[in-house]
Image: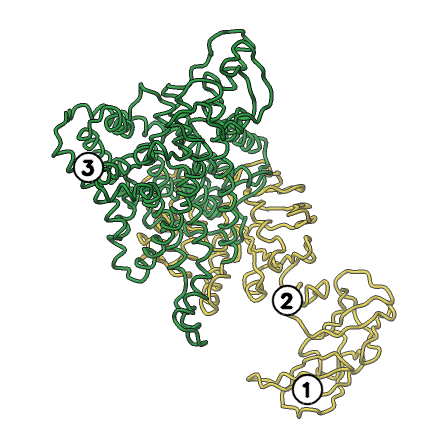
Amino acid sequence: MDRLEIIDLHKMYEGAPLLDGVSFYVVAGETLCLLGSSGSGKSTILRIIAGIETQDAGSILWRGKDVSAVPAHRRGFGLMFQDYALFPHLNVSENIAFGLRMQHAAKDQLGARVFEALERVNMTAFASRRVTDLSGGEQQRVALARALAPRPQLLMLDEPLAALDRSLRVELQEDLRELLHQTGIPAIYVTHDQEEAILLGDRLALLHNGRIVQSGLTEEVYRQPANTWVARFLGMTNLLEGRVVSVNPLMVQTACGTLGPFVPGYPSLLSPGQVVHLLVRLDGLFSGEHQPSAGSINGEVTECRFMGDHYRVRMKVGECASLECFTASPLVLGKALELRLNAEDVVVLPE
Amino acid sequence: MALLAVFFFIPMAAILNVMFAQSGDIVFSDSLRPLGFTVFQALLSTLLTLLLGLPAAYVFARFDFTGKRGLRMLTMLPFVLPTVVTAVAFNALLGPRGWVNLLMMKLTGAQAPPINFLNTFTAILVAHVFYNIAIIIRVVGNAWSQLDPRLENSARVLGASPWRAFIEVVYPLLRRPILSAALLVFLFDFTSFGVILMLGGAGFSTLEVAIYTQALHNLNLPMAGLLSLIQLACTVIILLLYGWSSQGNDVPLFPRLSGEGTRKPRSAVEKGTVALMVIILFTLQVLPLFALVSRSLVRLEGERGQRGKVQSGLTMDYYRELFVNRQQSVFYVPPSRAVINSMSYAGITMLLSVGAGTLLAYAMVKRPATRRWLDPLVMLPFGASSVTLGLGLLIAFSGSMLSRASFPWLVPLAHSLIAIPFVLRTVQPALSAMPKSLCQSAAVLGASPARAWWEVEMRLLSRPLLVGGLFAFTISIGEFGATTFIARPDNPTVPVAIFRYLAQPGGLNYGQAMAMATILIVICAVSIGLLESLSRAINGSE
């Protein structure tokens, strides 16, 4: 089975560990989104898998065999660089044909396969254009076609949409998603944009401080972030700081008094006295009466924004914390609120 | 412009005039042999320089290693060294009295020097490579280090072996820089004078050397004039080719992060390549200079009148002797005088060429239309060899009374003509890169035009001007070809004085030549060091 597994990858960069034991896998038919802030070593991982850089320690298994010693041009992996790295001295179809020529594809097949690749990205009209005359989005498509044309066994994309403006990005995300599922080869997609990750990733792997802090199905990761960093990185900011009072039942002391009991989240050991954050879902307040309560929160409305079909209310909780929630009708600023907190809508996150 | 017209085009016209007016024996076929040899040696030298320079450029562009900056500076040094010094340096290493021969004579007990390096074709080739490898390293190395390494990487990921990636991606993108560097090297090899005169000896005659011998030894000015014209025509062709090749020299693919393309050598092969390159460059570029400096400090042979009593050891005598007139001859000029001459000529050259170069740069930037015809015109004296220039000046100004008084001015003027293109090439980009809004905002802030020019433009231009000035100074210090024609016997410059010392027999003269060459090296090394740090500061502040 087409399966790439990375085991315990280490890499030093300028005297400090950049990758400090990275492990993950990706299988055929799925797209793994590798998320991390810039400078976290995401691109380095791709370059190591491609064979352009070498790891200090760790192994890269393709179909169960370590390919670390195989040079880049014999690995048969495709890599699309962030700013595409199209060859400026070749035109569009020559760029796409490059990988095919390296495979010694027959001359008569060459034209057909280049055309096929161009068709896939809707760029057939551009075949003989100079790549330096193309717009950003067009370059991106050509780069994708070039990466796919030699039919790589694995495709890696390094922030392929980062250089484009927003509207174009949204349009291309859809195309990419379709294309990646069509090919069915395992794909690793590097990005720092959580929206892109939700849309394109079947699974997520989050890289932080040289390690994968969490990996799993996209939905699972969103529902159960492993820690505060993951939650913040994925754009979940509705956090309330607290301290664990007891583990069983799980009670947490916050600015709004002691809340709980909560359901323990992602497998992690919590101990009394530990600093944690409560992640509260935006619709986790004001929910139905029948759900088990985890106490109530007192606050004061500081902001109320109309969002189309609902209102988004920000309220001050305690001295310095704040939480957000959705409401169906507007609330007056300064109004005191007492809200029921549903245990199921709260995740207890370690630091 | 007037300066250019008077001191370049009048001499050239004078050459033509002399050619047709004076009766002389123009033997057209006699010019073919030097021409053929010139082209042949220049081609071969260029090829050899490329052969060694390209791997060196690769190592400099793609790898980090200890001592890289120092080595880069050392490889630059020969490029600005006067040809005379180059010749003397190889003489000190491989000549009959050079280190290698002395050592081998000592070891084998042979009476005659075993290695016959001077006056061979090899000597010319080696010296040309020594001289010009810096151009390849600079031009190609810079382009290479700016080439986005991801292009090479994508080729690798797409299935190209390292060699294939080089042939199909790297080479096509570097072709223009390589071509223009090669043409520049070819031009320098083509117009090479001092190296061939001093290392090649009588057996080898390029156009330059032929002009020199026809004019000064055979006193056949028409023949020299014909050779000059052939020479000029060739250099114009090369210059046009060069201009065409450096046009649209676009390798615009800067890596996003500086230093992204370079890394430490990793595998054994890479380490070996880097080490080998460093050793080769060190041997080629540094050893001759080291030989020269050490030879000026060590006494190995008996003095005149002390035959048989050979004392060897460290000595400062050669430097001391520079200030003593031993021969008591009328024509003898103490070497210290030559040093003073050189320094003052260089100072005047610096002022003249910076002044003229800046004016020309302003003319080109403010009136882009003038640039089309001004640029090749200014580059012409640079391409027209120094010997041709010297010959022209000699013919044009030797007779008249006017020139008698202004004769000492001829040397710095000739040097300025050669230096102006360099100044122009430094100042003009800086000037055209300066945004107009700077002066405008100074005006809005209440500065008069003169004030704005002085406080804003001149401040920003001061560094490029200094760089250009240093270049001019260095060129003037080392200039040999034109100076041999126009420097009067009683007013030699340092390179001319060295040439004279070398031509005379005796250990003392040899040592003095070494000592003076060492002084030149030090001057050049200091200005190269200044140039490097200045240009780094310029790049850093942008």
Find residue A18 and name its label: none
Instruction: Using the rendered image of the protein, determine whether residue A22 is visible from the camera's viewpoint.
Output: no
Residue corresponding to mark 1: A302
Q: Nearer the viewer, mark 2 or mark 3?
A: 3
- In whole angstroms, how far apart are the C-alphas of marks 1 and 3? 92 Å
**Callout 1: chain:** A
Q: Residues within 10 Å of mark 2 (few under 14, many from 20)?
A: many
x then y, percent, for residue B51: 41, 30
Is A162 left, or right, of A280 in this rendering? Answer: left
Query: Is B255 in front, or is A158?
Result: B255
- In whole angstroms, how far apart are the C-alphas of marks 2 and 3? 80 Å
* Amino acid type indicated by mark 1: Thr
Q: Secondary structure at mark 1?
A: strand
Is A6 left, or right, of A186 in this rendering? Answer: right
Is B29 left, or right, of A280 in this rendering? Answer: left
x then y, percent, for residue A91: 34, 50
Query: Is A123 in front, or is B473?
Result: B473
Which tint was used for chain B?
green
Q: Which badge, 2 or 1, is on the more N-terminal residue?
A: 2
The chain whose colour is yellow is A
Q: Nearer the viewer, mark 1 or mark 3?
A: 3
Query: Is B81 in front, or is A341?
Result: B81
* Amino acid type indicated by mark 2: Leu
Q: Residues within 10 Å of mark 1 (few under 14, many from 20)?
A: some
**Callout 2: chain:** A
Residue corresponding to mark 2: A234
Residue drawn at (39%, 59%), measured in percent from left and top? B431
* Amino acid type indicated by mark 3: Ile
